[in-house]
């Protein structure tokens, strides 16, 4: 049992970042109906910018701020100027447009920074939680867990208790009717893209620390985030968090099984497929489809 605890703790910390990324996807989807495949690439860009600023000798906090700001600005620009021009298109077209954005960001980042091995080092890496005389988990991972839970609680409050959250829920229910009663759809959508950009930036910094700091690797980390969002039916924040944590824990635990350890990267796909099958069996739709009202 003692051997399992380190893997469990590490899995929870990584899963928390997956969950936070999934929350960003769900918040955007609830407002605009767009599945954002560029979420990982935007976060990856934030991590690369942060690393570059620190590498140039500037203070770490400046790197963090500029990295998240870069992700937020890019997401805002897409949501403000590009997404509205696609609002009348089918949801698949809008999703594919974000995939194109992801590949564009990934290609440019790969061209500029190359494929050299690097890692985003954070000050919180130095210390951590001790267990049996050994460091069980770094403060960075503890911080990631705390921020993920705190931000998720904040987003849940925004959706349930604020006028902005009410407008997001109205758009999810009926976009056309919401516009007729005075909801400024474009403004709400744009703010949803801003929120998604901030969350992508935060998760990008953490994943740049936890895994290899490489634009391609970080871009495809959107997969476990999407799987977590699918567990949450693209609408539920608590279920999305549960899905992200489950994926992280399974990925960590599967290392202990030699026959299955090579398939750890498939965990997100398996979890998403199982969730879809379970929902279909019980007659539950993944999300309310309002595409005919857009």
Image (cartoon, rainbow, N blue to C red):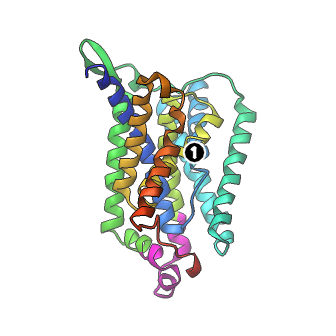
Q: Residue at x 53, y 45 (%)?
A: 269
Viewer can see residue 27: yes
| Crowdedness near tag 1: few (<14), some (14–19) or many (≥20) residues, C-alpha within 10 Å | many
Question: Does residue 190 sit above or below 197 in this rendering?
Answer: below
The N terminus appears in which quarter of the rendering? top left
Residue 178 sits inside the magenta stretch: yes
Residue 138 is left or right of residue 21, and the answer is left
Query: x, y (%) of residue 255?
Result: 44, 25
Query: x, y (%) of residue 140?
Result: 39, 29
Q: Residue at x 60, y 52 (%)?
A: 37
Question: Does residue 266 sit above or below 1 in this rendering?
Answer: below
Residue underneath mark 1 = 40
Extreme residue in the right direction: 111
Which range of residues does the magenta coloring cover?
Answer: 170-190
Residue 93 is left or right of residue 79, and the answer is right
**Toward the viewer: 224 or 28?**
224
Viewer can see residue 62: no
Residue 9 sits inside the magenta stretch: no
**Toward the viewer: 276 or 69?**
276
């Amino acid at each position: 049992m003692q051997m399992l605890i380190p893997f469990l703790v590490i899995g929870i910390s990584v899963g928390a970042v997956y969950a936070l990324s999934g929350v960003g996807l769900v918040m955007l989807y609830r407002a605009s109906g767009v599945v954002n495949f560029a979420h990982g690439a935007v976060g990856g860009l934030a991590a690369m910018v942060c690393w570059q600023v620190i590498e140039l000798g500037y203070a770490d906090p400046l790197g963090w701020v500029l990295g998240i700001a870069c992700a937020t600005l890019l997401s805002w620009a897409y949501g403000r100027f590009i997404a509205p021009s696609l609002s009348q298109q089918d949801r698949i077209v809008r999703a594919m447009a974000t995939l194109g954005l992801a590949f564009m960001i990934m290609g440019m980042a790969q061209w500029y920074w190359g494929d050299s091995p690097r890692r985003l080092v954070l000050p919180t890496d130095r210390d951590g939680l001790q267990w049996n005389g050994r460091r069980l988990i770094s403060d960075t991972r503890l911080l990631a867990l705390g921020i993920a839970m705190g931000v998720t609680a904040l987003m849940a409050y925004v959706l349930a208790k604020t006028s902005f959250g009410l407008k997001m829920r109205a758009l999810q229910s009926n976009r056309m009717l919401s516009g007729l009663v005075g909801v400024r759809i474009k403004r709400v959508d744009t703010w949803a893209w801003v929120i998604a950009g901030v969350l992508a930036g935060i998760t990008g910094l953490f994943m740049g620390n936890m895994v290899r700091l490489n634009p391609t690797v970080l871009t495809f980390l959107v997969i476990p985030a999407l799987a977590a969002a699918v567990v949450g039916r693209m609408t539920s924040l608590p279920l999305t968090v549960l899905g992200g944590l489950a994926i992280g824990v399974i990925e960590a635990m599967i290392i202990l099984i030699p026959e299955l350890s090579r398939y750890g990267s498939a965990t997100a796909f398996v979890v998403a497929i199982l969730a879809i099958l379970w929902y279909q069996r019980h007659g539950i739709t993944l999300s309310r489809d309002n595409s005919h009202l857009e």
